[in-house]
Structures are given as C-alpha cells and as structure tokens.
Amino acid sequence: MADKIQEPETLTMNTKLLDRDPDQTVEESEQILPIFEKLSNRVTNLRKEQIELCNEFKSITADSFHGSEVFDALQSLGEEHETLKKKYQEECQMLKNRCQLECSERRRLYNQVIELKGNIRVFCRCRPMNHDEISKGSSLVVDFDSAQENELKMIGPDSSRKHFKFDHIFRPEDNQEVVFAQTSPLVVSVLDGFNVCIFAYGQTGTGKTFTMEGTAENWGVNYRTLNELFKVSNERSDIMKYQLFVSMLEVYNEKIKDLLVEDTDHPTKKLEIKQSAEGTQEVPGLSQVRVHKTDEVWELLKSGSRVRSVGSTNANELSSRSHCLLRVTVLGENLVNGQRTRSHLWLVDLAGSERVGKTEVEGERLKESQFINKSLSALGDVISALASKNAHIPYRNSKLTHILQRSLGGDCKTLMFVQISPSSADLGETICSLNFASRVRGVEHGPARKQTDVNELFKYKQLADKAKHDEKETKKLQDSLQSVQVRLIAREHVCKTLQEKVRDLENQLAEERKTRQKQENRALAVASSHSLLSSMKHSLSTISEKRPPSKMRLPLRRISSFMPSPATTQIPRPFTASRFSNEDIENRSRPASNFKPLSRALQGSFTSQIKPKRRASIATFHSEPSSSSSTMTTPITRSSAAPRMRSDRVVGRRQSFVWRTQQSPLCPSSAFRSMTVEATPVAAPRSSRFMGSPHSHIVGSWKPKHPTVVALQQKQLVWSPLKYRGTKGVRKPFV
Ligand SMILES: Nc1ncnc2c1ncn2[C@@H]1O[C@H](COP(=O)(O)OP(=O)(O)OP(=O)(O)O)[C@@H](O)[C@H]1O
C-alpha cells in the first residue's frame, strides 16, 4: 500500500516541469501565471493531504481494524488466488497436451497419407563437425534454427539460403537413441508382415555406417532393430510365434559376397540374383542364420562387418568400399487364426558417393570408386524413372538396384537416411545429396502390402490341387462303381435264371431216373418170369450180330453229358470254348454212376440166366425246329409213330429234340421186345451223331402185348429243352 502512495518529491518534480521557460515572452508569462498559481495552491493542498495520510498510515496497527473481517477477506483472497493459479496451470497443461495430441495426430495422419501414397520416407541426419574440419576453420553451412519443423536451410557462399524439407531432420546433437526412436515404428512393421527397407545414402564420411551399424558404445539402427524385434516378439508371444533369420551380403565391384561365411582360405561361391516365382528377388545359396537373442546378433553383425571390404580414403580412414546389406527374415504365425507371414527387412549401408578427384584415389581404390559411383548412378536413374512414373525402370543396370527392386518400387515400406556433413568444405556434395533425397521423397510406389508366407500359399495351392484331383478320381471311381453295379445286377439276373434252369433240369432228371428205375424193375420182373430161355439166347445172338455201329449208339450215361455239371451250375462263370469242350469230354467219358444199380440189377437178373452181351436199347432223336420245347418220351410211347431219327443240321441254330426210344429193330423176339424199355435220352448239340443210323431196319409195326409194357408205353416222360448258345457245340461265354 505504501508503494502506491505518491512521494512528495515526485510532485515537486511535476511542479518543476511547470517552471517558466526563459525564452518565453512577457505576454505568454502573463497568460500562464494565473494557471500556475492555481496549480501551486492545489499542490500545496495535496502535500498537506499527503502528510496527513502518511501520518495516518504510520499509526495503523492490527488493532485499528474491527474484528477479523479484513484477515478473513485477505485469507479468502489468498485462497482465491491459489485456486486461480491452479486453474491457470491446469489450463496451461491441458493446452500443452492438446497441442501435443494435435501434433501427434497430425503426424499420424501425415504418416498415413505417406503410407497410402506409398512414398519413400526420407530422414536427414547431419553429423557434427569433426576435428579436422574445425582445425581447418571450416564454417557451418546448415541452418536448423531459422528453419521450420522438419526443414533445414543450406547457406550458400553468397549467404543465400536453400530450403529442404524431409520427413524428419536429425541435428548433429541427436544421438543414436533419438534416431532409432523415429525409426522403430517402421522396423516393427516387419513383424506385422510388411517388407521394410532402410538404407543410408550420402557422401563418404558423413556417418552412414555410424547410423546403420554404430559402434560398441553407440549401437546403430541394425543392432537396435533386432533388439526391438526380439522385444516386441516376446511381448506378442501370447498370440504370435516368430522366427528370425539373418543374412548378410555385400555388393563389391558388382559382385555379391556372403558376409556370414568367414572362410578366407576357400573363396566363397559366386552368388547371383534370381527372380522367384512370386516375383521377388532372391539370392540362392546365401547363408541364413537363425537368431534367438540380442547377443547372438551383435556377434553376427561384428563378424559380418569384419569380412566387409573397407579401405582408407582421404575422406574416411575406414571407408566402406562396398554396399553392405543385412537381411532379416521374419516368419510369423498367428496362434489364434493360424495365418502365416514371411517378410523381409533390408538394412542397407551404401558405399559413399565421392568425387574421384577429391578423394585422390588410384589403382584398386579408383576401380572400387568407379564401381561405387556406377551403382549409385544406377540408383539415381531408378529413382528418376520411378519419380517420373516411367514404364521401364532400369533395375537391372546394377546389382544394387536389382536386389533392392521390390524395396524401391515394390510393395514395401522404404526409409532413406540422407547423411550430410555440416562443413562448408562439403557444401557441393551436401547439396547434391539433398537434391537426390528430395527426388527420392517424391517417389510413390503404392501402399505397402502384407506378405503372406509364400510357402504356406504354395502348400495351400498344392492341397487345393490335390483336392481337385481327388474329386475327379472319386467321380471316376463312382462312375465305374455304378457301371460295375449295373453289370453285377445283370450277372445276378443271369445267374438266377441259370440256377432256376439247373434246378428244373435236376428235378426233371431225378423224375426221369425214378420213372426209368420203375420201368426197368417192371421189365425185369416180366423178363424173369418168362420161360423161353432158348429163344432169348437166339435173340441175343441176333442182336449182337446186327447191332448198329458203336458210335451211333449212345449209352445211358451220356445224358449227363448234356446236363450242366453241379460245379458249373452252382457258380455261374463265363464259359470258354476250351473249357466247355474239356468238360464235355470229361463228362462223356465218365461212367454214369447213377446207372450203376441198374446195370447191376441187369447183371444180377440176366447174367445168371441169359447173360446178354449188351443192353438192347437205342435212343434216337429227331429235331423239331418249330417246337420251342422238346419232349422226351419212352421208346414205347412213340415207337410206332416215328421209328426213325431226324436231326437238325443247321449249325448254331437253337435245337429242340423230341426224344423217342424206339423199339429195337433187331429184336425179333416178342419176349425180348418187351425188355427194350431202357430209354436213354441223348442229345447231340448240332450235327447229330445218329445221322445215317439204320432206321430202315426199324420195325414200325411192332406193338407190345404185355399189359405192363402197354401201360408203360402210355406213360410219357416230359423233358425240358436243353438250350445251348453258340455254334459248333461251344457255348458262348456269358457277358
Ligand atoms: N552423428 C554422428 N555423431 C558422431 N560421430 C559421427 C556421426 N556420424 C559420423 N560420425 C563419425 O564420422 C566418421 C565417419 O563416419 P562413417 O564411417 O560412418 O561414414 P560413412 O558415411 O560410412 O563413410 P564411408 O562412406 O566412407 O564408409 C566416423 O568416425 C564416425 O564415428
């Protein structure tokens, strides 16, 4: 409060200001005087007032106030002040946060745009001045302070400024950690299945190797990247399973060398770039080492760097004379959905661009420099072609651009570090590098694409092909199964029909045997009662003299030859000509066991008395083409009607026969005639064997007189036809 009271001295000063100017005229003085007097009176009054107030202020103590009102007011004011202060600070913090958020959001959106456009990102890193440059008195030509964010100005010799804008600018004081902080989001995307490529470009000695490899104390991007990949893969171990492999190669004088093979005695085999079926560039034969932890990686990178071709130049004591490429292959498997990815991360430390004249190289170094410059100029051509969206991009002009084909113009995320020197001595090269980097920044190669494991794809493709093939095979099998089923049904049907026929035939045969047995028994009974043995002897001798040729007579057993054998009838199977013939022959030659009792009976009754030389029974037949079924009769029933034999000679024609046992034409004796009741149905398939049988001798007018014989004569034997297929007595195989 005391500060706010104006001091009397200040007022005095003010009155002095009103003092008269010596240069003023009398008239002017007379005009001013009344005002001055007025003011001085006022001042005097104010002085009195001030003195009074001062005295009053001095006399004020705590007791001068009533109660605690003022203190309370002061306290509340203080609290209010504190609250306002807090609020102010909070507001400030909020504002700061909002700014940061906006900033990061802006950056995120910017990155998104870059990603969508597929631009190659460019970071610029300026190294600090080295001792040599400082000692030579070189000046700084890079201005960061006056430039805007992510911009730098190059100061020309005439103090002109040239602006360059990049995605991020690292100042000389920025350490490796800061650099990697900006780089890590990109490298981690290799774990998400994206191909990533980071390469360092710049004049020799500007810190490319320092940025990428670093030193034992200051690890570079390579080592930090692998460290980060291990870290993130561990964090994701619940849902993802990763395998990391490392390869290292260098392109030296346009030759590819495997840096992980450290056998100096045996030169490594020549490596070439080949295009895979998927369109990626591969180096067959390049060694690949699986890495599990950070320590392994460091050892591996160190051993690779040891093998790398380096040499000393004017610009750099340990100058890289080759392009060094580190490839990290990541195999990822999603444990939830089983999706597999296979992505590559290329970390490239290019050889330094240099002016041959400036570095004063000669001999081997000169040759190296020429190769380096040639490949870098090829890189420049590729970038120019990409930037101007040319149809043809000359990737194959150098090994470097060929191997980085997908990274420069493909579907991968690419980042370039442009390394610059701050020294005025390198201004020309620095401007060149920055111009090149600006062109690179303008290259759009489309959005990055997630890489699915091609092996997995191949496997799926193979499975799909196999499934397709299996489906075809199944269809074929189904078709053939269907046709087999149809054939089977047809065969079953045929088989069933045959079985039925066989059953019929067997029944008929059994029936006939029974009937014949009865007939024979009766005939024998009649014969045994006959007393004229001498005439019988005579008859027998006559029969033996005049019997037909043996081949014309068919024994009783032959009937079985025309019956399907049980074996053949039970299981239907295709007939063959040879089989049929053999079986036929066999059957015909086999004695008819079923007739044994009959012959024994004959022997028993006759041989003891009359001993006939053979049975006097002849079966004849004739074909009846018009009839579909054949009827077999006993010789007695039809002997009088047709005592002759006819045969159908038509080959291959279905035949049916009417069987007639005939009375023996050679039997003159009525007693013997009555014995000739043995019916032996035989069939000849086609050409009758009985052709030319002596039917002229057959006595057609003979009639039996014996009542039993007459009774038997009236009983007919019914025989179902034996049907044959094919010709010449050979059955056609069933289909
Ligand atoms: N940002 C930096 N901070 C400190 N030192 C640096 C930095 N960048 C480079 N250097 C130093 O500069 C020197 C040259 O660096 P480096 O060998 O990495 O250059 P280069 O571009 O790889 O050269 P060359 O193309 O000839 O191989 C090294 O001694 C390195 O330690």
Image (tube, grey):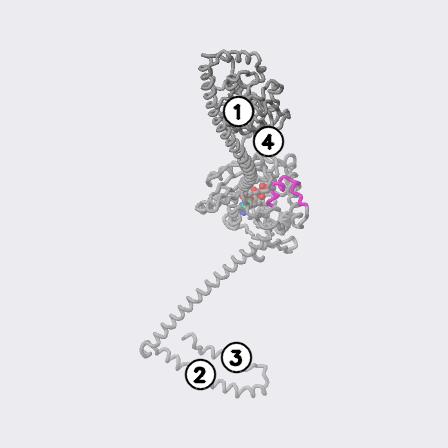
Place residue 275 in its image quadrant: top right
Mark pair 1, 4: CA separation: 19 Å
Label ID, residue 634 = 1
- The first of marks 1 and 3 along the sequence is 3
Q: Which residue is mark 4?
A: 627
For disc 2, the neighbor class at 10 Å (few under 14, some 14 to 19, many from 20) is some
Q: Which stretch is magenta?
A: 392-407
For disc 1, the neighbor class at 10 Å (few under 14, some 14 to 19, many from 20) is many
Residue situated in front as seen by the camera: 586 or 475: 586
Question: Can residue 161 be spotted in the picture?
Answer: yes
155 versus 264 height, above or below: below
Q: Is residue 404 magenta?
A: yes
Residue at figure coordinates x 51%, y 25% from the top left: 713
- The first of marks 1 and 2 along the sequence is 2
Q: Which residue is mark 3?
A: 17
521 versus 168 height, above or below: above
- The first of marks 4 and 3 along the sequence is 3
Mark 1 or mark 3, whichever is nearer to me: 1
Q: Are marks 1 and 4 in contact (CB under 8 Å)?
A: no
Q: Amino acid at mark 3?
A: Leu
Q: Amino acid at mark 1?
A: Thr
Q: Main secondary structure of the magenta part?
A: helix
Image coordinates for residue 365, horizontal then vertical, percent: 63, 36
Q: Which residue is mark 2?
A: 46
Mark pair 1, 3: CA separation: 181 Å
Mark pair 4, 3: CA separation: 169 Å
Mark 3 or mark 2, whichever is nearer to me: 2
Q: Amino acid at mark 4?
A: Ser
Mark pair 2, 4: CA separation: 169 Å
